[in-house]
Image (spheres, rainbow, N blue to C red):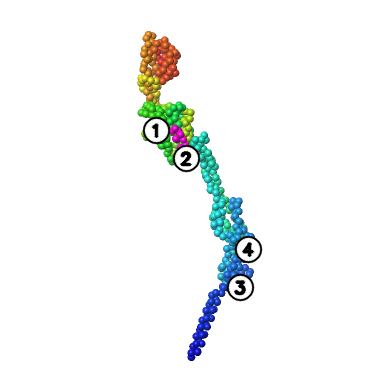
Amino acid sequence: MGKRVQRKRISAALAAFAACALFLCCAFSPARLAAGVWIEGENFSRMPVAAAQRALREKLAAELNGRTFTIRVGGRAYVIRPPELCYRSDVAAVLRRARERGGRYAIRRTLSVHRLEERIRGICADAYAPSAPARALFYPDREEPFAFVPEREGRYVDGAALLKAVRAALAAGEREVCAEVVRERPAFTLCRAEESASLLAAFSTRYAAGGNRAANIALAARKLNGAVLRRGETLSFNAAVGQRTAENGFLEAPTILDGKYVPGVGGGVCQVSTTLYNAALLAGLTVAEYHPHSLPVGYVEPSFDAMVSGSGSDLKLKNELNGTVFFVLRAEAGSLEVRVFGMRSPVTYLRESVVTARIPPPEPEVSEGEARAGKEGLASEGYLIRREAGKPDVRLRLRRDRYAPVRGSVPPPAAEEGGGGCAFRAARGRRGGERIGPAFRAPRAQMRGAPFRAFGVSGRIDREFFHSAKIYLINFKYFVTIE
């Protein structure tokens, strides 16, 4: 009985050992293809799968020896060779089927480029060149204030289109593909740059060269020279020029205050603002703020002056034109010129000053010192005429102004000389003109050829006009009546 049990136990142990051995043999033996497997015309029957896979990949690699694929972009060739050029195949899927059953199999394969998208990005980067618009360089201190840089044409390759074309060519087994380089021309060309620096307007006034007033004009012009006004911006004269103080470089010169000429620091600056004002009108800029003088000025027509002061009177110009505006100011040899540059426009402007009334000056005051001529006051209107080819002119009234007259002065009457003397009076205008001055007396014998000065006008009494009364012409403007 004991021996029988022992024999059963030994048999069970041997069976278990055989099962384990069979399991281990099956587990660690290489996987093999089925019998009767032919791949690409070669016998792979009972071949280990790993060996079959290695053999097939070597076969495909051998097919690519010497094979290239070329991408041509803008005259440049990018040649791709193995191993970057490779096959994309279904080897793994074929081997899975071949393990299960025998048969004849073919490998489907297409050309491919390793990391193709990265390669395409590199090609596009090589071909890319950014475009650059033309530029107008502003040099306000030069005789020709602008220099121009031509535009630069850009180029690029459509990366998405190139990637699609390369994949299609590889799938078709083609050996090269060509990509189109797109040329990109900037919208702002050299022609446009030159148009953007066209002379829109120029206006000039004259002044006496030398002295403090001329120095103030030149200083203010230098401070404004080179001003740039972009579209929508506003230029303030006072902000650009600064305070008219000695610390800011300005000198004492006559200024208009409360209807009189008085000494003041910065005298003459109003001629700069006035010249700028007129140039701005002719350029088509919008005048946001201006102020007239209380007295007429001699350097510009009535209703076209622009007074500025540090106490709140400013000249402000707003750019509502199509582009940036540049200002160039020159004050040399008694001539002040303002030029305005910007985008060329088909519209031009003209000014028109109309005097609607003249206001005679009051009787001159008698004072010591040099005689000063009185000056008429004026009532006037300023018009701007807009002119464009093919369209009727548009006449726009800008403003109405009234300028006060200036009282003249004469020296005290000379003492009478005895015997045969005569009195004479200065009268302004035609025969029978209004008497505007006091009587002066001098010996009759000394009258003919004698020098005469009154109200700032001088001459000699040397021309007789009428028989009934002796009236003499002085500078063809003032008459002297001999009593």
Mark 3 or mark 1, which is nearer to you?
1
Q: Is residue 170 left or right of residue 315?
A: right
Magenta region: 219-229
- Tell me which residue sits at (55%, 50%) in the image: 128
Q: Nearer the viewer, mark 2 or mark 4?
A: 4
Residue at label 4?
Answer: 63
Of the residues shown, which amino acid type is indicated by label 1?
Thr
Q: CA distance from mark 1 to mark 2?
A: 31 Å
Real-space CA distance between mark 3 and mark 2, rounded to the nearest whole angstrom: 84 Å
Percent position of residue 57, x then y: 60, 66
Query: Residue 228 magenta-drawn?
Result: yes
Instruction: Say which amino acid is labelled 3.
Output: Ser
**Residue 14, placed above or below residue 315:** below
Residue 45 has which mark? 3
Residue 101's tag is none
Element type at marker 4? helix
Label 1 to label 4: alpha-carbon separation: 91 Å
Which badge, 3 or 4, comes first in the chain's sequence? 3
Whole-percent x and y of residue 436? 37, 19
What secondary structure is found at the residue carrying circle 3? loop
